Image (cartoon, grey):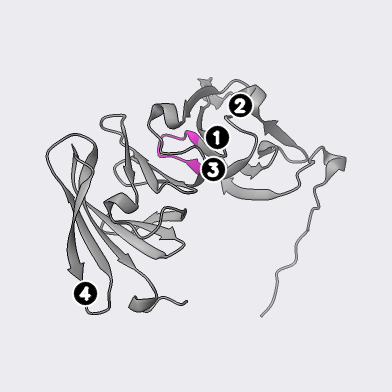
Amino acid sequence: GWFAKGNINIFSSKLEMKYYHAKCFLQDREKNIWMGSEIGLGRYMGELFRLYNQNDGLRSNLAWSILEDSEKNLWVGTSDGVTRFSFPLINEKKQYHSPLIKTYTITDGLPENIINSLFEDKQGNIWMGTENSGAAVLLKASGKIAVYSTAQGISDNKIFSIADDTEGNIWLGTRKGTCRIHLISPKLQAPSYKPQGRSKKGNQQSTINNQQSTIPLAEIKCFSTTDGLGG
């Protein structure tokens, strides 16, 4: 293999970047580089990072995940909930010094406040992977938060990563393999599930159903080492 010639820049306390651990990175549509650390959210400004922390409305200085949604809002998953930054436009330029802040915590319906991962699906719903309580999803249509956990059939409540596929299924990365969530209906339903048995390889499938308003109707299928995943 080969490497193209380039420059490596080392950022340290000399550049007012006293970060001990860089947790996550994101490049947004304006080509800003954002970095989450244990002292807040940094925006790279060429030589220095502009730091956003609790003094700016961030729920916690420990930032685990970053997402830019389809409306160019910036979402930050922290150790104490989720913060959404919206930067107002003046003369078609974003005003990064005065963000509009919206936060989501357990008081807003999250099952817990430690957020490991963030993802926006094709419908504009925001998915949030928690440390020990499954995946929460902020539904764009209703503004309500639904939760998928082991009670609904996923294999484990620690969610490391979230993605989707071309068919719109949501995939969760957990400690016990991966789970696929197929949303049957965007309407809110009750948080109960009925096991559908096991396949020949042993994967579990469940259908979430009932008639009351709590989570969207969905089918959940989980895969582990018995399905060919590496142990």
Q: What amino acid is at disc 4?
A: Ser
Considering the numbered disc 1 on the image, is that residue within a helix, a strand or a loop?
loop
Along the viewing direction, whichever of 98 and 18 lies nearer the viewer: 18
Task: Tell me the residue that label 3 is attached to.
Answer: 28
Q: Is residue 208 above or below residue 54?
A: below
Considering the numbered disc 4 on the image, is that residue within a helix, a strand or a loop?
loop
- In this view, which residue lies farthest toward the left? 211
Q: Residues within 10 Å of mark 1 (few under 14, many from 20)?
A: many
Residue 96, label in figure:
2
> Going from the N terminus, do you reach mark 3 or mark 4 first?
3
Residue at 47% from the left image edge and 49% from the top image edge: 132
Range drawn in magenta: 66-74
Q: What amino acid is at disc 2?
A: Tyr
Task: Tell me the residue that label 4 is attached to.
Answer: 199
Q: Nearer the viewer, mark 1 or mark 2?
A: 1
Percent from the top left, x then y, of residue 71? 41, 34
